[in-house]
Image (tube, rainbow, N blue to C red):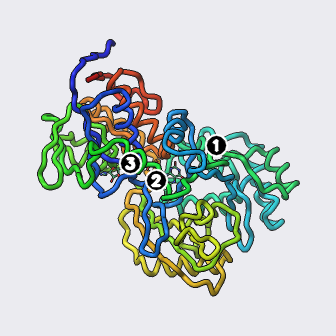
Amino acid sequence: MSLPMTATHDRIVVLGAGPCGLACANALRQLEHRNWVVLEAGSSVGGLASSVVDEAGFTWDLGGHVVFSHFREFDRLLAELFGSDELLIHDRSSYVRFGNRWVPYPFQQHLGTLPPQDAVACLAGLASVRLRGSAGQVADDFGAWLHAAYGTPMVERFFGPYNTKVWSVPPREMSATWVAERVAPASLGGVLAAALRPRRPHSTWGPNATFGFPACGGTGEVWRRLAARLGNQVRTRARAVAIDVRERRVVLAGGEVVDYDHLVSTMPLDQLVACAASAPDQVRRAAARLRHNTVAMVGLGYRTPTTDPRSWLYFPQADVPFYRVTNFSKYAPANVHGGDISAYSSWMTETSFPADQSFDPQALTRSCDEALRRHGLVPEQAPLASAHVEVIPYAYPVPTLRRDQALAEITPWLEAHGIHSRGRFGTWRYEIGNMDHAVKMGIDVAHRLITGTAEELVPAQHAGAVVVGSRS
Ligand SMILES: Cc1cc2nc3c(=O)[nH]c(=O)nc-3n(C[C@H](O)[C@H](O)[C@H](O)COP(=O)(O)OP(=O)(O)OC[C@H]3O[C@@H](n4cnc5c(N)ncnc54)[C@H](O)[C@@H]3O)c2cc1C
């Protein structure tokens, strides 16, 4: 099928100034297409990857972000935006809290550091599933996949409680299709070899074994710098509240109407469908089946330095509210008050809740502080210099069992109406939910609209066949 390459002044409206929306606008600019606007609901740019400075002068991200890349487009963007000394490079140092021990991450590759009875149970469990064959490859749900991949003892000790805590959804209600690069593998030989030489804590597994972090301004600095290039075509405080799919119009809170020829949306997919009054019932029902969780980031600054060299730590246990804590002053001295890490330290905790469940931020702050002290990360008597809470209502798009079926109902309908839903919650695909993926999706959809080039991350059946290229 040939693509209609009408050289028009087609108006491209981008909803959301997070990584995906900004990368899309930047690509349109580089392609010399001038007729675009980014409409951002919030008062600043960056979306989930933004950063804030609290009243005590501590910088916080919306949960632990690190910069890493699978794509040369993202590498190139970072190189354009940051000088060599402006992006600090770290080797990951990550551990799991197990009783009163620290087990290096990935847990399954460091069983030799467990108490002997736990190590033996986990090894026997792994051997038993491996000798039965690799049932993991045929498991439908994530719970079954975990049992088949690692054996029940390891699931009971770590994977079950940890994953239930992160997702706020039991693994058996999740699909196993997303795990490829997100859950470290465990070959029996490799696990046995590591267990017999337990003194090598360093692991280079996974895409973030080495990561970058802006020297100043938190992760959000990446997106502030990108938005600064784009000028006033990025509009903040411009929330889309309704979309007239037939007339191709977006209505903003306050009543302003913005016409489009193509709409690139990075807002959560369920909210996008809710904005489109003419969406058919089956599309609405499918959108209602999508599930997400909410995360509360409690950032705690202390008037004490830290000598802890580690990057982030996982907490599967039920008596600690957070599933992960980041040693944030280690990422960049500028994250603490006055950049003075000889006097201050900061820890960023993440606690997950089922979507929209209410909680008491003060009680959560107290229990996070107490847990950091109880587990020896912060000295008992260290004075608190700052406590800051950010609630992230849409934090993790949950890969539920029926997610792909729901997406197959929703996205072709949107595409057929010139609406391209991209990004972490635009595609609702956690497996392509990081910043580098978001940037790649934003760049690719811009190229597709202007030149007709196929997108790499979005399945063709979701992207639809009708593409109108335009170059102004
Ligand atoms: C706890 C946590 C930890 C993470 N850690 C990492 C990490 O270590 N590394 C990594 O690469 N990624 C990480 N991520 C993922 C990263 O935040 C996302 O990949 C990235 O922000 C997605 O960009 P996006 O543009 O797709 O969406 P978003 O960042 O969600 O941006 C969407 C934008 O749309 C706006 N919007 C919503 N509704 C409307 C509306 N109605 N009208 C107009 N605008 C609207 C929002 O305000 C927002 O600015 C993490 C995410 C979370 C939640």
Q: Seen in the image, is 364 located left or right of residue 357?
A: right
Give the quadrant of the N terminus.
top left
Identify whether 346 is placed above or below 402: below
Amino acid tagged 3: Gly
Distance from Cα at disc 3 to Cα at disc 2? 12 Å
In this rendering, which labeled residue sits more in front, label 1 or label 3? 3
Q: In this view, does 306 lie above or below 105?
A: below
Q: Does dot 2 land on a helix, a strand or a loop? A: helix
Q: Looking at the image, how many numbered discs can be counted on the residues?
A: 3
Q: How many neighbours does mark 3 have within 10 angstroms: few (below 14), some (14-19), or many (20 or more)? A: many
Can residue 14 be seen at all in this image of the molecule? yes
> In the image, is the residue at mark 3 within 8 Å of ligand 1 by its beta carbon?
yes
Q: Residue at x 60, y 39 (%)?
A: 138
> What label does residue 136 carry, if any?
1
How far across and down, in percent of the image, does residue 59 sit?
Answer: 48, 65
Mark 2 lies on residue: 221
- Identify residue type, mark 1: Gly
CB under 8 Å between discs 3 and 2:
no
Question: Where is residue 403, by image quadrant?
Answer: top left
